[in-house]
């Protein structure tokens, strides 16, 4: 028995579907793939009872949306609020925009959604998603453990800054049409010890709360500029992107100190791109304009991050001196099979072309999505399809090996 077949055999799956014929078909498909433990429920209420009665959670729920008594949306919501969480494959005969909205809801509430199935059901799609789930299951668990909630005090974070325990991992940005390296996004991590790496979700909000976020931003920029100097000596001269917190907009001295840091480094400001979330910009347009205009005047690139998650208008965005727009992964994941996402992307790309902005599609994980984006004329891509964020010691070997896709 292969390793994949053995992993599938050990799965526990709950099929939640009110149609008897479709429920039995899904159960049979799971068994044909080799899954030993397959249970079924005719609606969300029965499914919830089965979930709560189990000592351990089901590995995977295959869940229809339209069901009597307790529908699939309610079940997913209750599952996310419980301590018996499972991964969820969303199934429905409804339009893809609705299915995608439920998929996003589940993901936002902390559930893992390997994918969705729009009816009519197809055996190949069921097999593809279950196999994909199994292949990524252990990595997902490791990521969850790595992102466990650390209680970081003011003193602990201040000490980490003083002792320079923050490190950067770098995720490549690749020119879609040529495959050339476009740059790197610098992503900060806290290295508490040799085996304990803390991710931004566990310390950024605390740094903002304790008024340490400006100091962290200075440290990230210092590290990025220093690394660029080393890369230039090794033959890599590409821009590095750094994220800025909206909280820093409130500090009138922030941009001045940031500019001084860049100028003192001796590096070319044009090789530094600052990313700011769309929501942050719109919440405080005046202060954002003041700071971002100064950075742009210096020559730095400016990027709208997570585009599509806020409520900005094209008019508002055209008033800001941006050079790049990063489309949020929620509008990219699964785009090859979702017509409504394609419409949004193509209109955004058209807008960028007319405004002279570089469009970056982030969060690309699937080959089909990459192929669609490439065919559509996307400028730059970023995501696990090419490479996850890498520790600095892995970047040069990856580059010298010809930038192989690490997915």
Image (cartoon, rainbow, N blue to C red):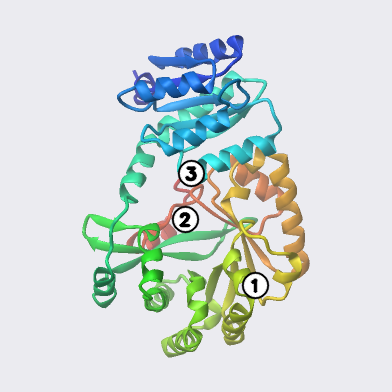
N-terminal-most mark, 2 or 1:
1
Examine the rendered structure and indicate whether residue 160 appears above or below residue 139. Answer: below
Q: Residue 274, percent across and down?
A: 53, 73
Q: Which residue is mark 2?
A: 402
* Distance from Cα at disc 2 to Cα at disc 1: 28 Å
> Alpha carbon of mark 1 to alpha carbon of mark 3: how far?
33 Å
- Give x and y (percent) for residue 102: 59, 37
Residue 317 locus on image (x, y percent): 70, 69
Which mark sits nearer the N-terminus, 1 or 3?
3
Q: Where, by quadrant of the figure, is residue 325 drawn?
A: bottom right
Q: Residue at x 41, y 73 (%)?
A: 224
- Under circle 3, the secondary element is loop
- Position of 208 compared to 286: left or right? left
Q: Quadrant of the N terminus?
A: top left
| Disc 3 to disc 2, C-alpha distance | 38 Å
Residue to which mark 1 is pinned: 323
Instruction: Check disc 3 and report the residue beneath it.
Output: 109
- Of the pair 282 and 360, the residue shown nearer to us: 282
Mark 1 or 3, which is nearer the eye? 3
- 4, above or below 308, in the image: above
Give me the disc on residue 243: none
Nearest the camera: 310 or 360?
A: 310
Q: Is residue 173 left or right of residue 223?
A: right
Q: Residues within 10 Å of mark 2 (few under 14, many from 20)?
A: few
């Amino acid at each position: 028995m292969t390793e994949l077949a053995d992993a599938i055999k050990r799965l526990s799956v709950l099929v939640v579907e009110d149609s008897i014929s479709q429920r039995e078909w899904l159960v049979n498909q799971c068994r044909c793939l080799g899954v030993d433990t397959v249970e079924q429920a005719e609606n969300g209420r029965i499914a919830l009872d089965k979930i709560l009665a189990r000592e351990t959670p089901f590995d995977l729920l295959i869940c229809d949306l339209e069901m009597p008594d307790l529908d699939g949306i309610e079940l997913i919501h209750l599952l996310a609020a419980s301590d018996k969480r499972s991964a969820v494959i969303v199934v429905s005969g409804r339009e893809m925009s609705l299915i995608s909205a439920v998929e996003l809801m589940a993901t936002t509430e902390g559930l893992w959604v390997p994918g969705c199935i729009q009816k009519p059901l197809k055996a190949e799609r069921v097999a593809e998603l279950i196999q994909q789930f199994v292949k990524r299951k252990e990595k997902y668990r490791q990521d969850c453990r790595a992102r466990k909630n650390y209680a970081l005090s003011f003193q602990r974070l201040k000490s980490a800054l003083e002792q320079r325990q923050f490190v950067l991992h770098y995720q490549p940005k690749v020119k879609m049409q040529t495959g050339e390296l476009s740059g790197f996004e610098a992503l900060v991590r806290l290295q508490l010890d040799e085996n304990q790496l803390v991710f931004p979700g566990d310390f950024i909000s605390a740094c903002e709360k304790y008024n340490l976020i400006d100091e962290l931003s200075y440290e990230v920029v210092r590290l990025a500029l220093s690394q660029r100097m080393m890369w230039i000596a090794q033959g890599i001269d590409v821009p590095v992107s750094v994220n800025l917190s909206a909280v820093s907009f409130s500090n009138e001295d922030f941009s001045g100190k940031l500019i001084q840091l860049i100028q003192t480094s001796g590096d070319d400001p044009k090789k530094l791109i600052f990313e700011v979330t769309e929501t942050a910009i719109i919440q405080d347009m005046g202060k954002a304009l003041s700071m971002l205009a100064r950075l742009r005047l210096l020559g730095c690139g400016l990027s709208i991050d997570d585009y599509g998650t806020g409520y900005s208008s094209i008019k508002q965005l055209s008033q800001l001196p941006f050079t790049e727009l990063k489309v949020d992964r929620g509008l990219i994941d699964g785009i090859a099979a979702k017509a409504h996402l394609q419409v949004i992307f193509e209109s955004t790309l058209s807008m960028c072309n007319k405004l002279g902005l570089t469009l970056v599609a982030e969060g690309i994980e699937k080959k089909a999505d990459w192929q669609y984006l490439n065919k559509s004329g996307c400028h730059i891509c970023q995501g696990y399809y090419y490479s996850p964020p890498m520790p600095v010691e892995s970047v040069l070997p990856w580059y010298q090996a010809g930038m192989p896709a690490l997915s």
